Amino acid sequence: MHVYWLRHSLCRIGVSPTSAQPIQPPIRNFKHCITPSSTMSTDCTSHQPAADSAAAGSAPASAAPTDPIVQYVVVRKDLLSDLKWPMGAVITQACHASVAAVVAAYDDPDVKSYLGDIDRMHKVTLAINNESELRALSEKLSGASVSHKLWVEQPENIATCLAAKPGRKSAMGGHFRGLKLFK
């Protein structure tokens, strides 16, 4: 499994895993590189499904989990209403927090499963009133040992949003009760 992820990482930055020489990255879709149930050639341009997906530790794509893995993202709604940030800037903040939370918890089994089924990722984007409420939520999550990333925009030093690591809905959802969907 580690060889697979190393190969995938080298391919993403344009280095051939066999020669350690830069290669020309072709324009391609990386979906095949991320699925743990596939293997790829050393040039990262072709792949074949693994012979035994059960051995790779993945469930069939048609199986819907009863307790899905979800990533919760919480965004300050006052950024749009009071501070008049452009919608694109607010979306970018949520993207930063989401990626940072995944990277920080990359070795977590739920995160690996979440990334392993990239076409079925579940995110819930919630709204919070202001920075003080966002920071209070971050402290509450820290106190409950919930891995998350509070995104603080620099150089302004403004907390804009947070994202929890992807986790089972049953374990994560209770921490975000009372928050409404971001609209």
Image (cartoon, rainbow, N blue to C red):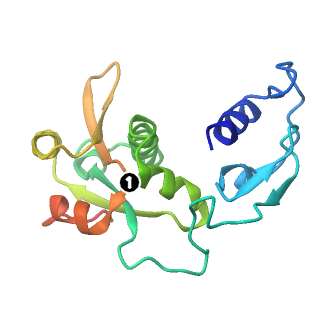
x, y (%) of residue 147? Answer: 27, 42
The residue depicted at 85 percent of the width and 27 percent of the height is: 18
34 up-or-down from 181: above or below: above
- Residue annotated with mark 1: 166
Q: Amino acid at mark 1?
A: Pro
The residue depicted at 16 percent of the width and 64 percent of the height is: 174
The C terminus, quarter of image: bottom left
The residue depicted at 34 percent of the width and 18 percent of the height is: 155
Q: Secondary structure at mark 1?
A: loop
Q: Quadrant of residue 52?
A: bottom right
The N terminus, quarter of image: top right
Q: Does 148 sit left or right of 19 as displayed? A: left
Q: Does 38 sit left or right of 138 as displayed? A: right
The residue depicted at 46 percent of the width and 41 percent of the height is: 99
x, y (%) of residue 170? Answer: 25, 69
- Badge 1: residue crowd in 10 Å (few <14, some 14–19, many ≥20): many
Q: Nearer the viewer, residue 178 or 156?
A: 178
x, y (%) of residue 161? Answer: 29, 43
x, y (%) of residue 75? Answer: 29, 50
